[in-house]
Image (spheres, rainbow, N blue to C red):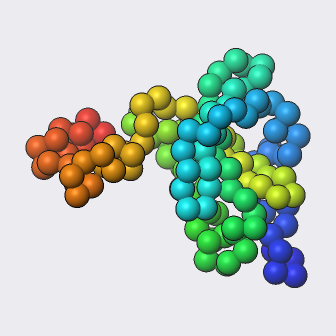
Amino acid sequence: MKDGQPTEDEFCTANSSIKNLDNYFIGKRIGQGAYAVVRLGLHRSLNQKIAVKIYEKTKLMEPNRRKSVKREMKIMEKLDHDHIAKLYEVFESHKQVFFIMEYVNGGSLHGYLKMKPNRQMPELEAKFLWRQVV
């Protein structure tokens, strides 16, 4: 961070640069949170579907938000589990931060819970679901 502004390369994983954006086609929005939007993407040379989580840097001006995104990146880099979407790389442009992730069809747990009464899952269903994950 320089003069209160996020700098480029602040969020990049090893061997990442804005040139990496040329490797991807970014398509329709498939999700949205408070600080980021998720779009369906395609790795051009591998012809592989991906998910692209895009943070606008203007929404990361507050130090705690920026720290949270960096923490998310560091944690996701270390995760390797069949039931957790993999993070392939993170890079940034002057205005955005891009998380390139494994595309998982079927929606999110958050979206699923939004359809449930009181946004809660019955205990037996939760036990079954988490038994599959652990």
- Residue 101 left/right relative to 60: left
Observer able to see residue 9: no
- Residue 41 left/right relative to 14: left
Residue pictured at 87% horizontal, 58% vertical: 94
Front-most of 78 and 35?
35
Residue pictured at 56% horizontal, 50% vertical: 32
Q: Furthest-bottom residue in view?
A: 3
- Residue 99 left/right relative to 19: left
Count numbered badges in the picture.
Answer: 0
Q: Is residue 62 above or below residue 99?
A: below
Observer able to see residue 65: yes
Q: Is residue 45 above or below residue 1?
A: above
Horizontal and vertical percent position of residue 20? 82, 38
Q: Quadrant of residue 39?
A: top right
Residue pictured at 69% horizontal, 67% vertical: 59
Q: Is residue 112 above or below residue 59?
A: above
Horizontal and vertical percent position of residue 53? 63, 47
Residue pictured at 72% horizontal, 26% vertical: 43
Front-most of 14 and 97?
97
Horizontal and vertical percent position of residue 5? 83, 74
Q: Quadrant of the N terminus?
A: bottom right
Q: Quadrant of the C terminus?
A: top left
